[in-house]
Amino acid sequence: MTEQIPSPGRKFRQLFSATPRGARLARRLTCCQLEEWGFPHGGEISDAAASVVAELAVNAVTHGRVPGRGFALTLLLARELLRIEVADARGERWPEEGRGGGSGLRIVSAFADSWGVRERSIGKIVWAEVSGMKGWEEE
Ligand SMILES: Nc1ncnc2c1ncn2[C@@H]1O[C@H](COP(=O)(O)OP(=O)(O)OP(=O)(O)O)[C@@H](O)[C@H]1O
Ligand SMILES: [Mg+2]
């Protein structure tokens, strides 16, 4: 898994409650933000990003939840790459594709070029990168 850190481009960051509603909101706001960045609702990029965010957010809420703490979504757009980061507060358990026979990370793998996990001071960040953002011009 190669991790490409985009140079400064567009950035969106928001905290959500670690609830199903928070996960749904994260997905919805991703589509709104992408629309603002020039990727229309229902388009290929918007749908891919929404699917990845939805699965990572649901995982943060179900597997990564720590009572009293939310999760954070960051979207970074630079050149032809969209980087999605979902940070949760649970550090001792990490995502593992195929564990428990889940389909979430398989969906992430299908839409993202690469994904991975990195530790942070509290909990972890699960990241995924979606490419093919052609047509987007950095101003
Ligand atoms: N944010 C997370 N924190 C801790 N563990 C995680 C996290 N995300 C995923 N995992 C672990 O990785 C496994 C695989 O995740 P995946 O999303 O593929 O399946 P699932 O969530 O179990 O089921 P599904 O997504 O189909 O509802 C999970 O069962 C869980 O053990
Ligand atoms: Mg899942």
Image (spheres, rainbow, N blue to C red):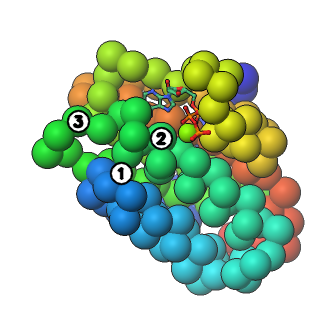
Type of amino acid at the residue the image marks with label 2: Asn
Type of amino acid at the residue the image marks with label 1: Ala
Q: Are marks 3 and 2 in contact (CB under 8 Å)?
A: no
Mark 2 — residue? 59
Mark 2, ligand 1, within 8 Å: the answer is yes
Q: Which of marks 1 and 3 is nearer the N terminus?
A: 3
> Quick one: quadrant of the C terminus?
bottom right
100 relative position to 137: left or right? left
CA separation in Å, label 2 and label 1: 12 Å
Mark 3 — residue? 66
5 relative position to 122: left or right? right
Mark 1 — residue? 72
Looking at the rendered structure, the secondary structure element under dot 3 is: loop
23 relative position to 32: left or right? left
Say which of 76 and 65 sits in front. Answer: 65
Looking at the rendered structure, the secondary structure element under dot 1 is: strand
Residue 16 picture location, percent across and down:
31, 59
Residue 122 picture location, percent across and down:
24, 29
CA separation in Å, label 1 and label 3: 13 Å
Looking at the rendered structure, the secondary structure element under dot 2 is: helix
Q: Is residue 108 above or below residue 32?
A: above
Residue 90 picture location, percent across and down:
30, 28
